[in-house]
Amino acid sequence: MAKWTLLTAVALLSPAICQVPVQPNAATAADPAAGKTIFQSHCALCHGLDGGGGRGPDLRRPKLDRAPDDEALKSLILNGIPPDMPDGGFYSPEDIANIAAFVRSLGNIPPEKLPGNPARGQALLERSGCLGCHILAGQGVAFGPPLTDIGAKRGAAQLRETLRNPAKTIPEGFLLVDVTTSSGQTLRGIRLNEDTFTIQLKDSHGRIYSFRKSTLRALKKLRNQTPMPSYASAFSPAQLEDLVAFLASLRGLP
Ligand code: HEC
Ligand code: HEC
């Protein structure tokens, strides 16, 4: 007991003993293991514990679409991608460097091999009415979200779940709305924008409307509802896999 007190006193009095050895480049050398811990508590929710994707894309690729180099990756982690991915303004620069180092290390893991056949999936998509609600490479109707880059935005597991059970994977910010105008006309649409006084909607033909809320007889927000049907029974499991493989391959226009 007395010995500890003495040592503490010596340590306090002598700066040489107190000094913690500092690596010359400790500020710049990133630690992927520390990054992994943060990733698993803050990012895995959307990107999977192993980085294999979900609500967000599979990060196990050597070249990331939105983060071609380390600076871009760090600024992406700091700023997020509104409205889909939250920002990381609360991380220290060290945290961000560590997370980025871990994300880069995922690039060495080969991405998941999908069982489906993308060409068959494309043919299925083209004859199944999907383009009656979605734009794909300039074709179709802009009611639901565009599919042109959906494989860069969502992991395969999430795409599979959307086809089976779309109400369970409704994207951030998506809202279906029913309005009744003062003359009694009704319209169902997807909310594009809303402020205190007005609301803008897009109908199933992709037409855009703006209403002053005070002129509407009724305005009903259909939370957690989607116009997209489930394809769980319309398609066989093999067809669903073909479609998932095709959707996962959609990474935007060249
Ligand atoms: C709430 C869900 C969510 C969370 C949490 C989240 N992300 Fe994302 N992330 C996404 C989505 C969705 C995208 C795709 C957005 C797009 O492309 O429009 C994305 C994209 C990315 C990309 C770009 C991938 C590419 O191919 O270019 C990186 C890198 C990334 N996220 C890393 C992270 C890291 C690291 C964390 C934790 C610090 C994190 N994300 C947390 C949803 C999330
Ligand atoms: C009646 C219109 C309609 C039809 C038909 C339809 N969808 Fe959708 N789809 C939507 C809407 C609206 C959303 C957004 C809300 C949601 O996720 O349910 C959506 C969401 C999606 C998403 C997820 C988008 C994201 O950002 O995560 C995918 C993938 C998708 N649809 C693919 C398809 C495919 C493939 C088909 C055909 C087999 C299809 N959809 C048929 C309206 C439709």
Image: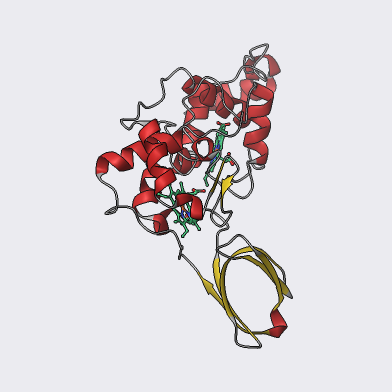
Residue 117 sits above or below residue 232 on the image: above
**Which of the 4 quarters of the picture holds residue 237?**
top left
In the image, residue 126 above or below residue 218: above
Q: Quadrant of the C terminus?
A: top right
Residue at coordinates 33% horizontally, 53% vertically from top-left?
231
Q: Residue furthest top?
A: 24
**Quadrant of the rendered structure where residue 199 is?**
bottom right
Residue at the location (42% across, 35% down)? 246
Residue at screen point 52% across, 44% down: 147
**Residue 175, position in %: x, y?**
55, 64
* Tally of marks: 0
Q: Is residue 91 visible?
A: yes
Whether residue 163 sits left or right of residue 23 in the image: it is left
Which x, y percent locates residue 198? 72, 73
Residue at 67% of width from left, 27% of height from top?
A: 72
Task: Please say whether residue 48 is visible from this viewpoint.
Answer: no
Residue 135 appears at what percent x and percent y? 56, 47
Q: How is the image coloured?
A: secondary structure
Which residue of the protein is positioned furthest toward the front in this rendering?
A: 127
Left or right of 24 on screen, residue 169? left
Q: Position of residue 176 (x, y in %)?
A: 53, 67
User: Observer-nearest residue: 160 or 44?
Assistant: 160
